[in-house]
Amino acid sequence: MSEIAKELLPMLRIYKDGRVERLLGNDVVPPGDPKGIVQSKDVNYSEANLSSRLYLPRHVKRNQKLPLIFYFHGGGFCIETPFSSTYHNYLNNLVAEANVIAVSVDYRRAPEHPLPIAYDDSWTTIKWVASHVSGNGPEGWLNSHADFGKVFFAGDSAGANISHQMGLRHAQEKLAGVNVEGIVLVHPYFWGTQRIGCEAKLKKKKKELVEGLWYLANPTTSGFDDPLFNPVRDPKFASLGCSRVLVLVAEKDPVRDRGYYYCEQLGKSEWKGRQLEIMEAKNELHVFHLLFPDTDNTKFMIRRIAFFLNQELIRAKI
């Protein structure tokens, strides 16, 4: 048996022969919803043989337009997929609560495919979906039900990191007919060289996991102040291409204070958005909503995100 070269527990092992053993997020579940509220299907969109899982409320009316959310899964850029039970169950719950059409984005993972591949694959997905703006793209659900005037980027952990980067890329490349109204960052995987908040007291193993995953995902990085990891160091930070941002943090999360720092710095910047909010879940861990999907805190968090996604629709009805 090959010797272990690196371990980042509980997530993965890398062996000296180059083999990667992922310890979490390997299961694959088919589309479907045991509650019968949401319908879903997998759609191939890339020459790299990548797919996305699309979600649509089952009760949607013919040609009814719904807010469109792109969801980027977490896992340190290294584990999980849109097709694991963890993310499939979460998207079913979110779509049912928020009454949106969702695209759960697949991207190639590190270390076999280091950054910026995950960012590039994610942008490829967005461009493919945007090809349906005129209503004559290859996917009927998007043609009939996606409201491209109400688009959101969302994700947790590394997926929140991707969401921010997609917001910057949209500001630079502007997809015709696509209005990114908001971005939802759940327990965003950001860091930095200078310790802030409780980071100085972080236990060694947690610190090694946070930092080790970054170097594994991006071996050519300039370090922890790389703008991809410490976004407030990015000269383009204030150009974030949306008008509303919601950040969710957890009290016992090692990256909690980075979420607060992101909000503080975005609020002080020249960002032209009009709404910036942060919500903290007390006594909770990183991505608790995935680990414990049936708790009151998880249900409340999903309701809070659903409200954010529909806030403008609610105001229009008042």
Image (cartoon, helix red, strand yellow):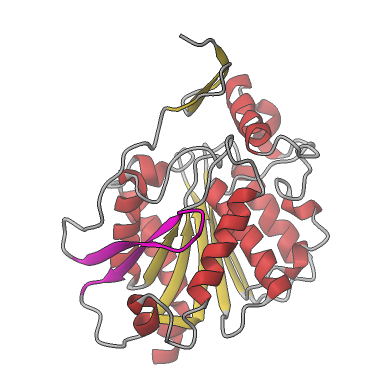
Where is 155 relative to 239, above or below? above
Residue at figure coordinates x 56%, y 76% from the top left: 181
Residue 57's place in the image compared with 193, above or below, is: below
Q: Is residue 246 left or right of residue 237?
A: left
Q: At 62% across and 63% down in the image, what residue appears?
A: 166
Task: Name the spot of residue 209 as percent of width and height, x first.
Answer: 59, 28
Q: Residue at x 70, y 73 (%)?
A: 173
Q: Position of residue 116 (x, y in %)?
A: 67, 49
The relative height of residue 169 versus residue 254 in the rendered view (above or below) is: below
Judged left or right of residue 217, residue 1 is left
Q: Residue furthest front?
A: 47
Question: Which residue is more in the foreground, 185 or 71?
Answer: 71
9 or 270, nearer to the observer: 9
Judging depth in this view, the residue of 250 and 71 nearest the camera is 71
In this orientation, does residue 257 appear? Answer: yes
Q: Is residue 308 above or below residue 212?
A: below
Instruction: Residue 161 in the image: state x and y as whole percent.
Output: 61, 52
- In the rendered structure, does residue 195 fall within the stretch colored magenta? no
Q: Which residues are magenta?
A: 37-58
Q: Is residue 46 magenta?
A: yes
Q: Residue at x 54, y 42 (%)?
A: 109
Q: Main secondary structure of the magenta part?
A: strand
Quarter of the image where one finds residue 299: bottom left
Q: Position of residue 183 (x, y in %)?
A: 56, 66
Q: Quarter of the image containing the C terminus?
A: bottom left
